[in-house]
């Protein structure tokens, strides 16, 4: 059973997209149009959908078939970026993430190829042709708790993880990965278990639409207060262990992680 089905939280809710009220982000030219940051207007944001990819350089290797113990601590001291599928990814179209280890979720390969991919929802939970990007993933490591989440072209890239407890952030329980209502939370825990000393996240927005099209209201937006509390707990546990964290999205509804741009993140 997929995490998505297990959560049973598929009800659609309404939300208002939030405009970035944040300094330090360059305007992006996307599909011949400019995304403008109006710092005075916090009620709406116009999102363009980019065909320009974010540059990555794959540095990971498939070194085993289980997260524990095969990958634990193998990337000690590295900087990680967690890439969700929110529209803030478009703000980084054309940027170079090559110096980071990138953990992406779901169909992130529309815009970048991650070092690690996390897939905890099976094929039946995806719509609008999203599974094809997961099926043909080029990531050397595809983390999933399912033996066969759906048709995967490179099944030898699948690496098994064990699902832990809900919203506990037991970071040092290396045999399991605790979960919440969204995959990037698990990806951040995996980053820690791999050895991360600094973790940024982008595309974890809970605003309208994904980065690739106008997919409508985020189904978890009504849970944002609880989700923010869960990320605050995760931040607290990470910082206790000396891991620095940042939210690289100026439009994210999450307030628990400090917002900053790439330059500020690099200087942490």
Image (cartoon, rainbow, N blue to C red):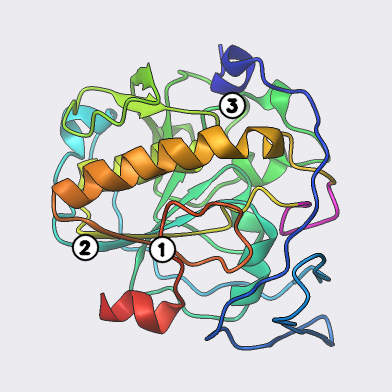
Mark 2, Cα crowd under 10 Å, few <14 / some 14-19 / many 20+, is: some
- Residue 78 image label: 2
Which range of residues does the magenta coloring cover? 208-215
Residue situated in front as seen by the camera: 181 or 15: 15
Disc 2, SS: loop
Say whether marks 3 and 2 touch (CB < 8 Å). no
Query: Where residue 92 sits: x, y (%)?
Result: 59, 75
- Outermost residue on the front side: it is 40
- Earlier-in-chain disc, 1 versus 2: 2
Disc 1, SS: loop
Query: Where residue 189 sits: x, y (%)?
Result: 32, 40
Residue situated in front as seen by the camera: 140 or 161: 161
> Could one spot residue 205 in this view of the protein?
yes
Quarter in which the N terminus is drawn: top right
Label 1: which residue? 258
- Earlier-in-chain disc, 3 versus 1: 3
- Residue 117 image label: none
Is residue 4 rendered to the left or right of residue 160? right
Q: Residue at x 63, y 47 (%)?
A: 107
Q: Nearer the viewer, mark 3 or mark 1?
A: 1
Query: Where residue 209 sits: x, y (%)?
Result: 78, 52
Dominant secondary-structure state across the stretch colored magenta: loop
Is residue 124 shown above or below 46?
above
Is residue 155 shown above or below 254?
above
- Residue 121 image label: 3
Q: Residue at x 59, y 26 (%)?
A: 121
Quarter in which the C terminus is drawn: bottom left
Disc 3, SS: loop
Question: Magenta span has 211?
Answer: yes
Mark 1, Cα crowd under 10 Å, few <14 / some 14-19 / many 20+, is: some
Query: Where residue 37 sits: x, y (%)?
Result: 72, 82
Is residue 264 rendered to the left or right of residue 259? left
């Amino acid at each position: 059973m997929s995490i998505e089905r297990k959560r049973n939280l598929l009800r659609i809710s309404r939300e208002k997209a939030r405009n970035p009220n944040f300094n330090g982000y360059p305007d992006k030219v996307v599909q011949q149009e400019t995304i403008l940051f109006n710092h005075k207007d916090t009620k709406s944001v116009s999102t363009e959908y980019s065909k320009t990819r974010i540059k990555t350089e794959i540095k990971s290797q498939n070194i085993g078939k289980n997260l524990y113990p095969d990958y634990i601590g193998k990337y000690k001291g590295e900087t990680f970026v967690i890439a969700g599928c929110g529209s803030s990814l478009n703000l980084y179209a054309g940027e170079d993430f090559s110096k980071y280890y990138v953990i992406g979720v779901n169909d992130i390969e529309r815009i970048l190829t991650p070092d690690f991919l996390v897939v905890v929802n099976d094929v039946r939970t995806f719509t609008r042709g999203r599974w094809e990007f997961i099926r043909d993933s080029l990531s050397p490591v595809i983390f999933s708790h399912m033996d066969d989440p759906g048709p995967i072209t490179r099944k030898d890239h699948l690496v098994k993880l064990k699902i832990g407890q809900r919203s506990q952030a037991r970071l040092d329980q290396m045999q399991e990965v605790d979960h919440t209502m969204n995959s990037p939370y698990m990806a951040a825990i995996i980053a820690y278990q791999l050895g991360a000393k600094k973790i940024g996240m982008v595309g974890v927005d809970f605003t309208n639409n994904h980065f690739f099209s106008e997919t409508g209201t985020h189904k978890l937006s009504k849970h944002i207060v609880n989700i923010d509390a869960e990320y605050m707990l995760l931040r607290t546990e990470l910082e206790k262990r000396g891991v620095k964290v940042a939210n690289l999205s100026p439009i994210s509804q999450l307030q628990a992680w400090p917002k900053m741009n790439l330059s500020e993140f690099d200087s942490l």
